[in-house]
Image (cartoon, rainbow, N blue to C red):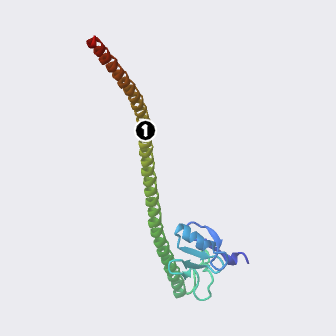
Amino acid sequence: MLIVQYLWVCLICSNVGCGRYKAGHSLQHQKKTGHHFSKDLYSGRIWDYITDIFVHRLIQDNKDNSFLNLPEGQTLQDESQNSEKIQRIDNQIWEYCYVISQQMEEQRKFFESQIKEAEEEFKGEKEYKQLEEIQQEKEKKLNELRQNNSQIKQEILKNEKNFKFNNIINMLYNIIFFTLQYIIFQK
């Protein structure tokens, strides 16, 4: 019974963990999943993490805090006592249904937000991947342009050398030509 004293169970997914006064596993579970209601297995009380209080006991008799045991197939002698117990059970069932329906609505919202976050994250990853591909294409084109630029510079240098060489040849040709003309006209 000592171990059960510290165990709490999630009312949504039945996850069992240590309570808030021991290792706090049920609190960690609530933060991770958003499940707001846990039952203390020792006392039978239900803890609401939103309001941070015990909300009620599940189907327990308010007089002696014990679980209600209805005899099978027996009718109670006192009609008012029977009606009172049925009313209590009915009220507790409605309260439990209300708590569960609230929790289910919160879970629906929680999981819808989780799905939306996952979709946005996937969309962001997809856009990031597309941007990465575009960047790789641009880098490839840039490298091609750099390579072309380098080839063009080499061609220009080669052409400059050829141009200078051709200029020198032309100058020599002109010098020889004019010198020959001078010599011929001098005679």
As drawn, the residue found furthest toward the left would be 185
Tell how many labels: 1
Question: Residue 119: where, in percent of width, then height?
Answer: 44, 56
Residue 1 in the figure: left or right of residue 150? right
Between 109 and 68, the one nearer to me in the picture = 109
Q: Is residue 151 above or below residue 133?
A: above
Instruction: Please state the horizontal and vertical placement of residue 85, each as a whole percent of the image.
Output: 54, 83
Q: Where is residue 25 drawn, in percent x and y?
A: 63, 72
Q: Nearer the viewer, residue 56 or 86?
A: 56
Q: Amino acid at mark 1?
A: Arg
Q: Is residue 168 visible?
A: yes
Q: Residue at x 49, y 78 (%)?
A: 95
Residue at the spot 43% in from the left edge and 32% down from the top edge: 154
Q: Is residue 110 above or below residue 155?
A: below
Label 1 residue SS: helix
Based on the displayed image, in which of its 4 quarters is residue 177 positioned?
Answer: top left
Which is more toward the observer, 101 or 165? 165
User: What residue is pinned by disc 1?
Assistant: 146
Picture quadrant of residue 167: top left
Could you classify mark 1 by the number of other residues whose Cα lies within 10 Å: few (under 14), some (14-19), or many (20 or more)? few
Location of residue 178 by image quarter: top left
Q: Quadrant of the C terminus?
A: top left
Q: Residue furthest bottom?
A: 63
Quadrant showing the N terminus: bottom right
Query: In this orientation, does residue 11 appear?
Result: no
164, above or below 18, in the image? above
Who is closer to the viewer here, 90 or 142? 142
Q: Is residue 138 left or right of residue 19?
A: left
Would residue 156 be found to the left or right of residue 59 on screen? left
